[in-house]
Image: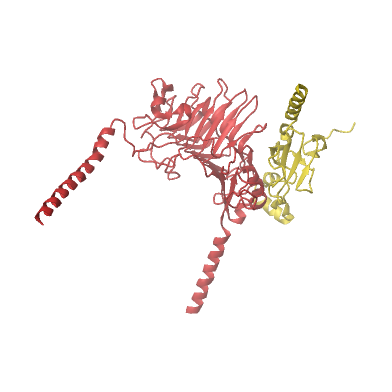
Chain colours: A red, B yellow
Amino acid sequence: MHRTCTIIAVYSLLLCLQGESLAADIVLYVDTGAAAGGDGTTNVTPTVNDGHQPYQSLTQCEAAADGVYEDLVTAGNTMTIHCNRTNGGGVDTERAYFDSSWITDATHTLTIMADDFPADGVFDDTKYYLHNNDNLDTGTLLINTNYATVDRMQVVVTSTSTNSRNGIVFTLLASGANEVTVSNCIIKGVPSGTGSSYGIFVNDNDGILTMFNTVVYGFSITDNTGFRGVSVANVSTISNCTIYDCWIGIYGGTGGASFSVTNSAIFGCGYSNGDIVASTKTVTYCATDDNVGTSAVDLNDNASGEWTASFTNYGAGIFTVKDASAPIYNTGTDNPGSGLYTDDLANLARTTTWDIGAFEYDDSEAPAGTGQVIMMGSLIPLLLIFARLRRTEARLRQWRGLF
Amino acid sequence: MNAKRLLFIGLIVLLAGVARPAEVLIYNGTHWMDKLTAEQLAEYAKKYDNWGEKYAGRWQKGQVVEIRPDGFWGKGPYPRTDVFRVVLLPGVKEADVQKYLDPGTTERRRYRVDTGATKDVETVTGIKTLSVTDKEAVIPERT
């Protein structure tokens, strides 16, 4: 009996181990500084081709992986693609396109992320970023794949002439299984011409977008509603994002019961009442010029310096909370993502009460006007230690005199 | 002396005026969907409502992956030759071949480049010698 039990236990263990080995997170690497010829299985960039260095662009990686790993569901895998820019590499100017041919589900997901994302959450052109560089009317990163996540990516969109140039685009998503996520990203527009340009575009009513800790700015041409920071389908949950200088901040079409924006700062949008445009919307704890929603913070078109008081340097793309007196400090609501994220774009932990926008103010910093008190507070223990040392020294001298 | 200098400057101007050749990366792998049997294809079609879209969206031999400027790959090394092939196009501007990245109505690319299909690297002089199939070309009716 004992022997039978042991055999069953060992056999079960082996089955479990086999099951473990079947399911895996396939990790692939992209590095614009890599030599050609690698299969993307390591992030090491040797000066010569050793066959395993990263792919040179995200699109190369996608094309090579598509033909082999694409059915993540049957294989029981997830996939994560890490993007980098080392070894003197340049900008990734090749449009990346994840077609609907990828097979994913809620468990077997696809994640695209940059490893060298700027630590301070401010756009950095020396780090990895995608930049459209072709004549096509589409997205710089085009995704037709359900359950795809874009995390910690920088994307720059240059629009010209009458074309339609966009940043991250989701389209042709299957009905039902259609969730996509954009998190911790910086999307920057360089607009010109009379065409259209969206930072993030969900071009599909089936799309269910979750977006948080993301900065979108610079999608504005005066009197052109084709320039939008975010243009989404009906079902979207946007929280702790900062959207600035877009002709329309967030366009939600007809919106609906599931179109919600929380803890976000949307300002500097030229279109009339253009911070959030949607027939039906739920907006809570947002800071906007249009003072929209409930528990709102009015940024008032900076009429009384509200933008200046809120952000470190919004004109330079630095959207960190200026100080503890900022209107967006501690005026959000805690944990709007129900545990989905607990830090900010710069990896700083969110603390109660959460701030509005993509950044959390560092509460360990000195609150405005109290610097002197804190300085004195930290000096007192030092002074006490110094006094005690002086007393000890005096006693030693006395004892030396005795002996 | 002046004549030599003028000749030198003229040569530089001439060289600078020559269009920078493009280098084209083409998908050359065999996609896993193309290895499925008829029975397996039927199973996938039953499992996924949008299987038609998924199948059409797979990478296919001859589709252009990316276009790079002169010298990007040059004499090598080249991207994985088990998945890709490269066509070098001296004298052809990048802008002139960018349309080959155009998506099709259902497929990833509207065009298929057949040139150099059996080689890892092929050099082609002039865009007219490039063999390209437009999959969505309208065939005129017979009159």
Q: Which residue lies furthest to the left in this view?
A: A402
Q: How many discs mark residues in the rendered view?
A: 0
Task: Give the side of residue A199 with respect to residue B91, left or right.
Answer: left
Task: Give the side of residue A355 with respect to residue A174, left or right.
Answer: left
- Note whether A209 is above or below A395 in the view shown: above
Q: Front-most of A117 and B108?
A: A117
Q: Front-most of B84 and A187?
A: B84
Residue A166 in sight in this render: yes
Q: Residue A308, how many percent across, how many down?
A: 40, 25
Residue name at image x 72 percent, y 39 percent: B23
- Note whether A17 is above or below A334 in the view shown: below
Q: Residue A377, how many percent across, how many down?
A: 24, 39
Q: Front-most of A130 and A376?
A: A376
Q: Which residue lies furthest to the front in this view?
A: B1
Q: Residue A350, how many percent across, how many down?
A: 39, 41
Q: Front-most of A366 and B11?
A: B11
Residue A253 in sight in this render: no
Give the quarter of the figure containing the C terminus of chain A: bottom left
Q: Residue A103, how many percent across, how many down?
A: 62, 49
Image quarter of residue A379 = top left
- Note whether A242 is above or below B36 in the view shown: above
